[in-house]
Amino acid sequence: MTRTHWQLVAVGVLGVVVACVADDRAVGPQPSTPVALADQGVGSGSFVFEPLAASAVCTNGGSATQPLVLPSGFDQTIIGSEPDFQTGIDMNTQNETGQQAGRYLYRVSEVGSNASLSVTDLWTGATKKIAQRADWESLDPIVWTPWGTLLFAEETNEAAFRDPAFPQSVAGLVYEVFLDPADPTVVTNVVARPAIGSKSHEGMRFDPQGNLYSISERTPGYIYKFVPDTKGDLSSGQSYVLKVTQPDGDRTGGAEWVPLPRPAVIVDASAAADAVGATGYGRPEDVEIATSSGNAHGGANMLYVAITSEHRVLAVDLREPKGGSDHGSAHVANYVARGLNTTTEFIMPDNLALDHSGNLYITEDPGGNTAGGKRGDDIWVATPAAGNASAAATVARFATLTDCEAEPTGVYFDLKGQRLFVNIQHRGGDGADKAVAIAPARGN
C-alpha cells in the first residue's frame, strides 16, 4: 500500500481495555449474531449489515477512539496503538495453526529503514516489537505458512538497503521468521528467501498445495506463483508469472503460468517477467485465496488480486486444466470493477480479506486526502454470485474512515470469522497509528 507521500508522526499513548474470558479470550467485544440485522442487509454469519449510504466527511486526524464509521450493530475496539509498535503498521496475520492458534496477531511496519515485526497477545492485550533490522525497508505483506512460520516481505522496487547476504537482489525480498513453539512471541531465526523473487511485494498467499502467490507492485506489475522444489521449503523452487494468452477483454481471459529463469528472479523478478511478455496491470497490490486468513471453507481455487490504479479486483480461476505451460493454465476475469458491478465511488482497491462465506472485504487507498469536505477511505464488501459466476453479485460499503490522511490496511478475519482486524495507517492528528478489531455489538 505505497502512498504518494510520507509524513512524520508523533508518538502517542493509548490505554487498552482488556477483557478476558476462559478459553476463547479476546480483547474487546465478543461477537454474537446481530438479530436486528438478520433479515436485511448484505453479508453473512455474524457480519450481516445494512450498507452505509456514503463515505464519512473526514477531518485531519478524525476520531482517535472511533476511527471508523460502521453500520448499526457493530463496535470497534482499539487493540493497539503507537508507541507499542512502530509507525506505518500494515498487514496482519494470526498464528493460524499450532498451540493456542489465533491467540497472537502479527503485523509489520512500512517505514523507510529499520522496519520491524510486532505482535499483540489477544488474550492479555500486550503489544511488543519482536524483530527489527536496519536493512529491512517498507515491510508490507505478512502471512502464516502452512508449516507454522511467518513470512513477511519488502515493498520496494529499488532497495535502498540491500540484504548483505544477497547484494545482487535489486528490489524487496521475502523473509521467513521462525518462532519458539513454546512462546510464539519469541523469534528464534529469520532467513531470507530470495528464490521467491526480488520485487516490490505486497500480497502473499498459499494454496492448499503449498504454492505461494504474490505480485510485483509497479506499473506494469505482475501476478506470480512460486512452487517450492520441496513442499514446505522455500529455499528453492520455480517461479511462474501469469500471461493472458486467450484474451476476452482488457487483459482478461485464458492465461498460462510461464516459468521464469531462477537466477533472474533472485536479481529482479519484474525484469524477468518483462522479458517473457507477462501480462501487466496497474499496481497490483494484495492477493487473497480462501485457504488464507484462517478460512478453509471453500473457494480455494479462486485467487483474488487488487489492481489498485485500475479500480478493479481480478478473479483468477486456478482450476483450468493443464495447458500451454508446464504448470497448468488459469482464467482471469473482473470480479469487481467500475461499470461492471460498482460505481465511481469505488476507488483504488488495496487490501483484501475473505470471510468464511466467500464475501470479499476490500479496502481503499486513494492516498493523501485533505480536510475540507473530502471523503474518508472506505471498506467495501463484494458478495459472490450464485453458480460460481466470475463477477460479484453486489458491492456494498461496510465502513468508512473519519481521518482524511489515513488509510485502512491489513484487513484480516480471525480464525472463527467473527472479528475483522484492520490497521489505521498514516494517521493525521496525533499521528499514532491504530490497530482495530471490528465485531458485532454485544446484545444484538
Image: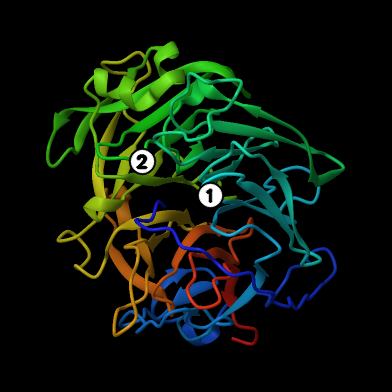
CB contact under 8 Å: marks 1 and 2: no
Image spot of residue 10 (x, y percent):
59, 70
The amino acid type, in three-letter code, at marker 2 is Glu
Q: Which residue is located at x 42 percent, y 28 percent?
A: 225
3D distance between C-alphas at marks 1 and 2? 29 Å
Task: State the SS at label 1.
Answer: loop
Q: Does residue 213 sit above or below 276 in this rendering? A: below
Q: Which label was assigned to residue 217?
A: 2
Residues packed near mark 2 inside 10 Å, few (<14), some (14 to 19) or many (20 plus): many
The amino acid type, in three-letter code, at marker 1 is His
Q: Which residue is located at x 45 percent, y 27 percent?
A: 198
**Residue designated by label 1:** 297
Whether residue 321 appears in this view of the structure is no
| Front position among marks 1 and 2 | 2
**Residue 338 as seen in the image, left or right of residue 31:** left
Q: Does residue 356 sit above or below 322 in this rendering? A: below
Residues packed near mark 1 inside 10 Å, few (<14), some (14 to 19) or many (20 plus): few
